[in-house]
Image: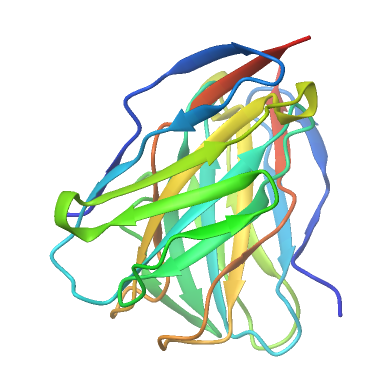
Amino acid sequence: AQKVTQAQTEISVVEKEDVTLDCVYETRDTTYYLFWYKQPPSGELVFLIRRNSFDEQNEISGRYSWNFQKSTSSFNFTITASQVVDSAVYFCALSEDGTGGFKTIFGAGTRLFVKA
Amino acid sequence: NAGVMQNPRHLVRRRGQEARLRCSPVKGHSHVYWYRQLPEEGLKFMVYLQKENIIDESGMPKERFSAEFPKEGPSILRIQQVVRGDSAAYFCASSPGQGLNTEAFFGQGTRLTVV
């Protein structure tokens, strides 16, 4: 069965601190995608990154970086020098390329509070 | 290139009324997915449709909920006789099909409030 676990329900940091959001997934497929989405207080889903299962290279985009470790089934997300605007709920998600199309399984989300 | 368009963005219904949520996929996309996000929770898959076909409705409640994706026009998620527990954000996503380099794009969601 597919499952995404975000063990951290809420994290609170002070501006400029680095913060890592954890994500652990379960799947039996060899071909799958991992995603991170941001949901700000306004409610929309903002796509941050997609990773496919064949690409374990870590990625950096500005203050954001992602660490994909297939050996531990983890796809962690780090925000460097956090800012108040980073306050949001962050979802990790898994999508498998199969007969289910791109049905996406979401984690429960981690609510990040960044205090000034 | 317009993304996934959902309307209305906000919908208020009284208990017992019907709610109709619309989703226009990205132009050229033939696969649509509906998700529900209850307050303070993650998104949960409801249904996956291709043009005129329901492929996977394993996440749909057995009663009062239905979905369609006709040959022409948007996909519709219909909730009959709404109850307070239906209050949630409903997200739609679309994809062009299956394959390693495709992905699903999400709309901005419809927030349903049942009063």
Residue B76 position in % (x across, y down): 65, 62
- Tell me which corner region of the image, top left, top right, bottom left or bottom right, holds residue B98: bottom left
In the figure, A103 relative to A3: above or below? below
Left or right placement of residue A99 versus residue B19 in this view: left
Q: Position of residue B3 (x, y in %)?
A: 78, 70
Q: Residue at x 82, y 37 (%)?
A: B10
Q: Quadrant of residue A4?
A: top left
**Rendered location of residue B103, percent (x, y):** 53, 75
In the picture, measured across the screen, residue B96 lies left or right of residue B109, that is: left
Residue drawn at the location 31% of the way across and 25% of the way down:
A7
State the scheme by which the image is colored.
rainbow
Q: Nearer the viewer, residue A35 or B108?
A: A35
* Left or right position of B90 against B2: left
In this rendering, does residue B85 appear at all? yes
| Nearer-the-camera pick, A49 or A60 | A60
In the rendering, at what x and y percent does residue A92 appear? Answer: 44, 45
> Looking at this view, is B65 or A107 the one in front?
A107
Q: Is residue B38 above or below residue B66?
A: above
Image quadrant in which you'd find residue A68:
bottom left
**Left or right side of A59 for B8:** right
Residue drawn at x 71%, y 30% as measured from the top left? A86
- Name the quadrant of the C terminus of chain A: top right
Res A109 visible:
no
Which quadrant holds the N terminus of chain A? bottom left
In the image, residue B107 above or below residue B88: below
Numbered disc total: 0
**Vertical comparison of B102 with A75: above or below:** below
